[in-house]
Image (cartoon, rainbow, N blue to C red):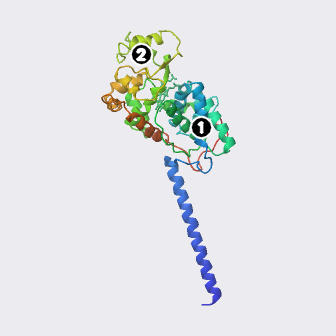
Amino acid sequence: MHISNIMEVSSLNKTLILLVLVLATFTTMAQGQGSRGRGQGTRVGFYRATCPRVESIVQSAVESAVQANRTIAPGLLRMFFHDCFVNGCDASVLIEGPSTEKASGPNSLLTGFEVIDAAKAQLESACPGVVSCADIVALAARDSVVLTGGRRWQVPLGRRDGLVSQASDTANLPGATDPITVQIRKFADKGLNTQDLVTLVGGHTIGTAACLLFSYRLYNFNNTNGPDPDINQAFLPQLRALCPNGGNAFRRVAMDTGSVNSFGNSFYENLRNGRGVIESDAKLWSDRRTQRYVQGFLGVRGQPGSRFNAEFGRAMVKMGNIHVKTGRQGQIRRVCTATN
Ligand code: HEM
């Protein structure tokens, strides 16, 4: 074979090898995008190279806000739940406008938005255009739990921010008067099972509820002219004193009586003792489908129940992967209140 032919063959080989390599890379990338699109694409340490201080920046924003006002912690935890259940965890709950999720009834009592904005502003100066608002919300929820005494978990990151936010989509959020069957279905629609439901509602251990959301249970429940029979007789006067008939509808009452500032399983002890405040919480004990999981979180023979604190993080990671946008989907917002 002539020398120039050999040259031609070897350069052809090189071209072929290069082509195969390029194709292989594309296929891997496409597969990566595909699995990310199905919600598997978040991972711990996503910003390790691009914004290594992300976790400490969010943490210090949450810490200083909670130090100034401890009700911020439950606010941020609930914000994450309301974000994930509507259009997936994509910060759609933060967008402002006349008919966005934020303007809807179910989100009217959400708090803590300014903490997300403060963290975002700091992140934009540390690593511009890199960290999504959706990831800030996920981290802030975790930090709120840790600050109130819950167990820390690692938060997979890499969510991208959504472009759509519509008030009407919030109808699928669970409501306090939803029967257990509906609650179970609404969680199942998001890929969460009954155990996840009972575990995640345990977030109410640090929460408060406005009188308007449960005072109907205290006086004329279902037109019976009496209280909800699920409420413990000894607890009833306490709740009535906090929410007198016709009193301030916006007064806030602890959902985990006696332990509202500390994250833990006492919430489930209260449910067992007929001291659930909102109707949907009380039903977790009265319905056998959920009671077995409540029972699983009660302390055993003087040992405080630590299982709940461990399970909560696991369930939060699962909730945090609902319909996440990754890869080239969505965008990284410049400010969290509006799309770019
Ligand atoms: C069946 C599901 C659920 C229902 C029906 C429900 C309902 C409610 C209601 C009615 C309130 C009182 C709102 C107010 O007065 O401002 C509330 C507060 C709260 N919820 Fe839920 N919730 C559910 C699940 C969850 C989940 C999964 C989480 C988080 C993992 C969560 C976290 C919170 C927190 C932390 C608060 C207190 C907010 C604050 O104090 O500012 N909830 N929830």
Task: Give the x, y percent position of residue 163.
Answer: 61, 40
For the N terminus, the image quarter is: bottom right
Question: As drawn, which residue projects farthest toward the bottom?
Answer: 1
Q: Residue at x 45, y 24 (%)?
A: 176
Question: Are there few (<14), some (14-19), or many (20+) residues within 10 Å of tag 1?
Answer: many
Q: Residue at x 38, y 34 (%)?
A: 306
From the Cβ of disc 2, is ligand 1 less than 8 Å away?
Answer: no
Residue 213 vs residue 92: left or right?
Answer: left
Task: Give the x, y percent position of residue 339.
Answer: 65, 39
Query: Which structural element holds mark 2?
Result: helix
The disc placed on residue 58 is 1
Question: As drawn, which residue projects farthest toward the front?
Answer: 302
173 is higher (above) or lower (below) than 161: above
> Could you tell me the amino acid type at mark 1?
Val
Task: Give the x, y percent position of residue 62.
Answer: 58, 32
The disc placed on residue 217 is 2
> Could you tell me the amino acid type at mark 2?
Arg
Which of 57/30 is in front? Answer: 57
Question: Are there few (<14), some (14-19), or many (20+) residues within 10 Å of tag 2?
Answer: many
Q: Residue at x 57, y 72 (%)?
A: 17
Q: Residue at x 50, y 52 (%)?
A: 35
Comes first in the chain, label 1 or label 2: 1
